[in-house]
């Protein structure tokens, strides 16, 4: 398990999806009181004067919330139909739904256990969670104004197929907000896939430094949660999963092997 988490980016696409499902099921098993609502790496504003306002009980998740805020800051979610592919433990979906008032917010994940978990825990107007696969989205064409995908596109199995399905479910002039880890030598390939699907790239940014700063600043909190929740023999695998400081994953960002890219993409026509 630990080897997979460290080297996921070189594993076959067919292997990634079931392994992430296993990790998600284990998190539910070990964290029954939902101490962990977010599964992303987080985002740190390098500008000292930039800081979003949060409720007191949300401060512990600040870095993870700031990643959602960064990804969505260039679009208006108000009264829009929003789909999040790979909604995980639902923290980001709940945050955006409560703070930005979309008309509807649908969280989709391939893990049946995660969807059950989210539908039981989150009882909010306009927010729902459904099981589905990014490579075969269970929605009609032209169903959403905005699609969000953070840190899970690489686990869909086939990025060109995933991007094509996102394009199909978006309405005319719809927006795809995409942020994920990518090997440094595959960034141009990724952009090619997006254009081939029909998207125009409205905005792109390498946010690796912001991600690394968040991982470093949030490392102690994540390490403490892992020690509290996870059996000792699995703790190192979960450190890799979380990308805590000095893990193989963290060092892959540090040495330039991995980048973290953020995109705003538009469907024309």
Image (cartoon, rainbow, N blue to C red):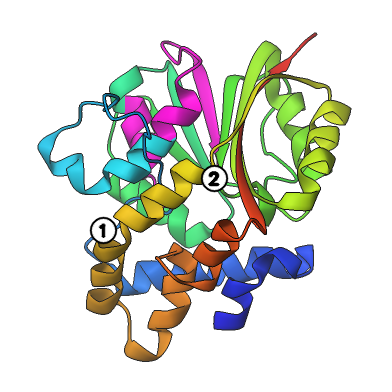
Q: Nearer the viewer, residue 4 or 248?
A: 248
Disc 2 marks which residue? Answer: 208
Q: Is residue 217 left or right of residue 1?
A: left
Q: Which residue is mark 1?
A: 34
Residue 72 is covered by the magenta coloring: yes
Location of residue 211 with respect to 218 vertically, above or below: above
Say if residue 203 shows up in the picture: yes
Q: Quadrant of the N terminus?
A: bottom right
Which residue appears farthest toward the bottom when viewing the image?
A: 233
The single residue placed furthest to the left in the displayed view is 56
Residue at image location 42% in from the left, 38% down from the top:
67
Query: What is the C-alpha distance between the residues marked 1 and 2?
Result: 28 Å
Q: How many numbered marks are there?
A: 2
Magenta residues? 68-97
Which percent across, then down, holds residue 107? 49, 39
Q: Residue at x 52, y 58 (%)?
A: 112
Q: Quadrant of residue 161?
A: top right
On the picture, is 55 further left or further right than 89? left
Residue 257 in percent (x, y) is at: 67, 59
Residue 249 location (% of width, % of height):
54, 66
Is 3 rendered above or below residue 132? below
- Which of the pair 86/126 is nearer the observer? 86
Q: Which badge, 1 or 2, is on the more N-terminal residue?
A: 1
Q: Nearer the viewer, mark 1 or mark 2?
A: 2
Q: Tell me the residue at 30%/25% (across/down).
A: 50
């Amino acid at each position: 398990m630990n080897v997979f988490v460290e080297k996921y980016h070189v594993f076959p696409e067919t292997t990634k999806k079931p392994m992430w499902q296993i990790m998600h099921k284990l998190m539910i098993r070990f964290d029954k009181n939902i101490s962990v609502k977010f599964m992303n790496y987080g985002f740190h504003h390098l500008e000292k004067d930039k800081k979003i306002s949060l409720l007191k009980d949300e401060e512990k998740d600040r870095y993870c919330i700031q990643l959602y805020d960064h990804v969505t800051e260039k679009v208006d979610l108000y009264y829009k139909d929003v789909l999040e592919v790979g909604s995980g433990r639902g923290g980001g979906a709940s945050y955006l739904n409560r703070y930005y008032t979309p008309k509807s917010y649908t969280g989709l994940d391939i893990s049946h256990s995660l969807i059950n978990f989210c539908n039981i825990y989150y009882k909010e107007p306009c927010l729902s969670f459904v099981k589905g696969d990014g490579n075969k989205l269970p929605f009609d064409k032209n169903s959403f104004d905005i699609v969000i995908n953070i840190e899970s596109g690489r686990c869909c199995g086939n990025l060109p197929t995933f991007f094509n399905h996102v394009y199909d479910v978006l309405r005319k002039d719809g927006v795809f907000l995409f942020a994920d880890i990518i090997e440094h030598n595959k960034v141009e390939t990724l952009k090619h896939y997006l254009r081939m699907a029909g998207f125009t790239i409205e905005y792109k940014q390498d946010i690796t430094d912001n991600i690394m700063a968040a991982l470093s600043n949030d490392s102690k909190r994540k390490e403490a949660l892992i020690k509290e929740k996870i059996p000792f023999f699995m703790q190192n695998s979960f450190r890799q999963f979380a990308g805590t400081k000095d893990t193989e994953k963290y060092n892959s960002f540090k040495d330039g092997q991995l980048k973290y890219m953020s995109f705003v993409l538009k469907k024309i026509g």
